[in-house]
Amino acid sequence: MKLRPTPLAGLYEIRTAPVGDTRGRFTRLFCEQELAPIRRGLHFTQINLSETHGLGTVRGLHYQTPPAAEAKLIRCLRGRVYDVAVDLRMGSPTLLRWHALELAEDNDRAVFIPEGFAHGFQTLTDEVHLLYMHTAPWTPACEAGLRHDDPRLAIAWPNAVATISERDRSYAFIDESFAGMCP
């Protein structure tokens, strides 16, 4: 595994190196020892599979507030997505900045998103499956989100938004009083 820091501290692109032969490929998706430079003793409590249909669909931007703030390791198993993380950490020099990368079934990338970030994605193919590994269980009382079209974020989505849930569309825009959250 190769760990590539992004411009947002704590957010990493992870590149894996599959081993293949005439039978197919083998890819290590998680190795605590190899991810130790990011987080020693990284422990996941929940693994989820997200299936999204329709080119241009947006999910997010989601996060959990303390005491259930979570880190995520995300990999695309089918299709392609434009994956976005937004820094929400109080006092961070990159507060409200976002970083995106393309995750695809064939590009051997994953993204590690630490606590204190919102996450969302846009589908670049009609059928997408994302594998999510979480360091905290989903806690409905701590669930929160940002608007994908918030002008303070100015995310450059690659395609027009074709589909978005009512919940994701209903999040409020960030106001001037937002100072971030403590992960």
Image: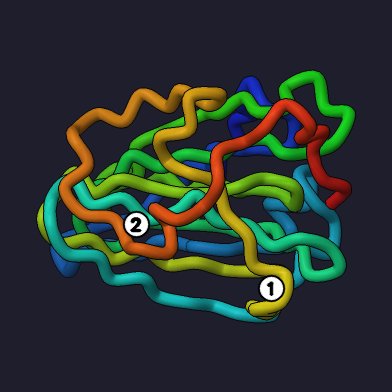
Residue tagged 1: 44
Q: For mark 2, give the secondary structure.
A: strand
Residue type, numbered disc 1: Phe
Label pair 1/2, CB-CB below 8 angstroms: no
Q: Quadrant of residue 72?
A: bottom right
* Relative image position of residue 3 (x, y in whole percent): 61, 37
Tell me: 127 left or right of 136: left
Q: Residues within 10 Å of mark 1 (few under 14, many from 20)?
A: some
* CA separation in Å, label 1 and label 2: 18 Å
Q: Which residue is rendered at x = 54% and y = 78% of the image?
A: 47
> Closer to the N terminus: mark 1 or mark 2?
1
Q: For mark 1, give the secondary structure.
A: loop
Q: Is residue 162 above or below residue 5?
A: below
Tell me: 3 left or right of 157: right
Residue type, numbered disc 2: Cys
* Relative image position of residue 38 (x, y in whole percent): 76, 45
Q: Which residue is rendered at x = 48% and y = 24% of the image?
A: 151
Query: Which label number is shown at residue 76?
Result: 2
Please state the total of marks drawn on the protein image.
Answer: 2
Q: Which residue is rendered at x = 84% and y = 52% of the image?
A: 183
